[in-house]
């Protein structure tokens, strides 16, 4: 039984469609798909030659591409003629197809004046051509043309299949172009990421690490194989895990995050347990509808160290400036105070000296008068000596040059001796003693100096004819030395600062430079004790000095002020 020609043609078109579908879907590149399409169409449709035209890199002209297929030999000369030409949009015939995206059938091309390759076509007996655009999302991306030596191709039904296939090729070209762009983008990303000094970490919506670069291995000390597939919390100190989890879940549920799109300072955790100060920039993107996160992590240890060093340097500079201001202030106060306090004893010394010089030339003083002047001179000399001693002791304490000379001593005996040595300074003031004997480790010379300064301070502020009370009381862990005067007392706002250098109560008698009490406080601290002042019941000031009985000595050789 004879086979129907129409049925045979339909079968051939079906077979061609099948072959085209397999060839296009199985192609790994656009060039491979185009080459397969040209071969299948050329052979199935009885075409002599098929070739592809592509826009040049500028997109301004259409040029003959490297993909072509000749079913018959002897077509190289026509191919060479095609390679020499290009077409602008709108130029016949390829330019027109490129411009409007419609297929065109060119009959009798050897007699068509608009066909620029007519002479080359006639030389190889090509008579007709079919020009088909390959469209994409942005327009025509390529043009195919097929040539025959006959007036029409052997299988005219194949021509109808070409247009449908061209649309499929257009989608494939767009897809392959996108894939190529993605591969180029990925290649660029990897090239940049792998050479970056910063760590780059990508995680998925479960917090699982899916990518790390070499910088991550260098910064955190983990090899890539130990990080991929693990949770990102491995790189975060444990105390920050709750905050990380809360922020991560908040973004997954609400899309809100304070980190994404900004750069923040955080801490990372190295493989050896060290915490790393790092700067983190976080971005998010979707893959198949699932959010992914990429973090760029920069080690700022050097910057942090420099900032810390700058802070220390700034603090030292500020301390130096403050110290210089203090020195300048102390200098001015010191000069004012010393010039005033030296002037009195010097004036008395000068007056007494003058009287004694005059008496040496013309004796007129009785022995007791001469003795009185000598006593005044000695008192003036002692005042200046005490002033200089206080200055030297204070400076040595401040410079850390004073050491402790501890030895067992009866504190009551030390206080009683100091009172006796300075009884002449009390004048008509009454001194009462209540001294409990207690033997302990002290620096006797320093205790004597503290008691002396407290006694001189009391006499300075106590009116003549009133009482100065001195006591020593032994307690469980300390001994307390007290000196109470009947003077104006110390205002409450002055009680904490009166032991600072050059501090005096307002309205005082103006003697001394305000270092005696400061020296008492510093020597007490050197013993491990303290000094303070209270209000005396009935009026006046009650100065107290506490010295610990055990472990009393401060093992430092000086104080920091």
Image (cartoon, rainbow, N blue to C red):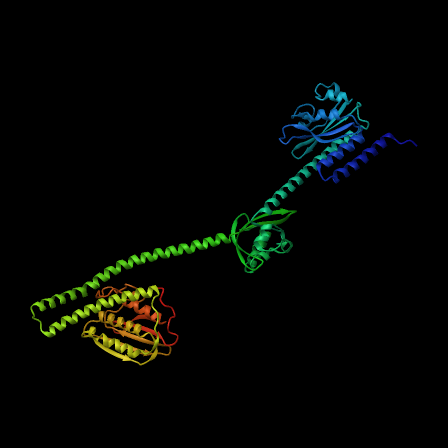
Q: How many marks?
A: 0
From the viewer's side, name the closer residue of 344 and 106: 344
In the rendered view, tell whether residue 347 sits above or below residue 190.
below
6 horizontally vs 301: left or right? right
113 horizontally vs 502: left or right? right
Residue 492 appears in the figure: no
Residue 39 x %, y %: 77, 32
From the viewer's side, name the closer residue of 1 and 545: 545
From the viewer's side, name the closer residue of 497 and 287: 497
In the rendered view, tell whether residue 303 sits above or below residue 350.
above
In the rendered view, tell whether residue 23 sits above or below residue 310.
above
Residue at the limit of the structure toward the front, as seen here: 361
- Image point (73%, 34%), residue name: 34
Query: Which quarter of the picture shows residue 229?
Result: bottom right
Residue 351 x %, y %: 13, 65
Residue 339 x %, y %: 21, 61
266 horizontally vs 490: left or right? right
Quadrant holding the N terminus: top right
Residue 66 x %, y %: 71, 31
Residue 15 appears in the figure: yes
Query: Which quarter of the picture shows residue 530?
Result: bottom left
- Image point (45%, 55%), residue name: 308
């Amino acid at each position: 039984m004879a086979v129907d020609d129409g049925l045979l043609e339909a079968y051939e078109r079906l077979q061609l469609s099948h072959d085209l579908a397999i060839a296009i879907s199985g192609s790994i590149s656009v060039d491979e798909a185009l080459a397969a399409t040209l071969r299948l169409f050329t052979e199935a449709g009885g075409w002599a030659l098929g070739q592809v035209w592509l826009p040049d890199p500028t997109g301004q002209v259409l040029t003959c591409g490297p993909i072509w297929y000749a079913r018959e030999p002897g077509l190289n000369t026509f191919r060479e003629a095609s390679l020499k030409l290009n077409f602008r949009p709108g130029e016949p015939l390829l330019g027109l197809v490129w411009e409007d995206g419609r297929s065109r059938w060119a009959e009798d091309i050897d007699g068509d004046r608009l066909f620029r390759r007519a002479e080359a076509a006639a030389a190889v007996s090509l008579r007709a051509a079919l020009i088909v655009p390959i469209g994409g999302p942005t327009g025509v991306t390529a043009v195919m043309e097929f040539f025959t030596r006959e007036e029409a191709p052997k299988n005219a039904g194949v021509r109808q299949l070409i247009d449908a296939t061209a649309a499929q090729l257009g989608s494939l070209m767009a897809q392959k172009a996108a894939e190529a762009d993605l591969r180029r983008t990925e290649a660029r990303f990897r090239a940049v990421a792998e050479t970056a000094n910063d760590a780059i970490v990508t995680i998925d919506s479960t917090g699982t690490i899916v990518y790390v670069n070499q910088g991550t291995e260098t910064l955190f000390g983990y090899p890539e194989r130990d990080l991929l597939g693990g949770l990102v919390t491995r790189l975060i100190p444990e105390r920050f895990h709750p905050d990380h989890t809360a922020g991560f879940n908040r973004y997954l549920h609400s899309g809100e995050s304070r980190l994404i799109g900004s750069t923040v300072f955080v801490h990372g955790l190295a493989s050896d347990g060290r915490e790393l100060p790092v700067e983190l920039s976080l971005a998010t993107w979707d893959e198949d509808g699932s959010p992914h996160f990429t973090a760029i992590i920069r080690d700022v240890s050097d910057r942090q160290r420099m900032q810390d060093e700058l802070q220390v340097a700034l603090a030292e500079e500020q301390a130096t400036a403050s110290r210089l201001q203090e020195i300048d202030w102390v200098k001015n106060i010191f000069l004012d105070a010393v010039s005033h306090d030296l002037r009195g004893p010097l004036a008395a010394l000068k007056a007494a000296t003058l009287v004694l010089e005059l008496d040496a030339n013309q004796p007129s003083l009785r022995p007791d008068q001469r003795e009185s002047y000598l006593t005044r001179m000695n008192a003036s000399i002692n005042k200046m000596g005490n002033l200089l001693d206080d200055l030297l002791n204070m400076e040595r304490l401040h410079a850390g040059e004073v050491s402790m000379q501890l030895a067992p001593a009866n504190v009551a005996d030390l206080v009683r001796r100091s009172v006796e040595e300075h009884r002449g300074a009390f004048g008509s003031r009454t001194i009462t003693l209540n001294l409990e004997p207690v033997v302990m480790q002290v620096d006797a010379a320093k205790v004597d100096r503290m008691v002396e300064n407290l006694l001189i301070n009391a006499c300075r502020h106590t009116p003549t004819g009133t009482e100065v009370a001195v006591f020593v009381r032994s307690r469980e862990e300390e001994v307390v030395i007290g000196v109470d005067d009947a003077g104006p007392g110390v205002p409450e706002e002055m009680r904490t600062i009166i032991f600072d250098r050059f501090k005096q109560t307002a309205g005082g008698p103006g003697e001394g430079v305000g270092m005696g009490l400061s020296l008492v406080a510093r020597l007490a601290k050197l013993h491990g004790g303290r000094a303070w002042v209270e209000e005396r019941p009935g009026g006046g000031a009650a100065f107290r000095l506490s010295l610990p009985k055990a472990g009393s000595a401060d093992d430092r050789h000086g104080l920091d002020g």
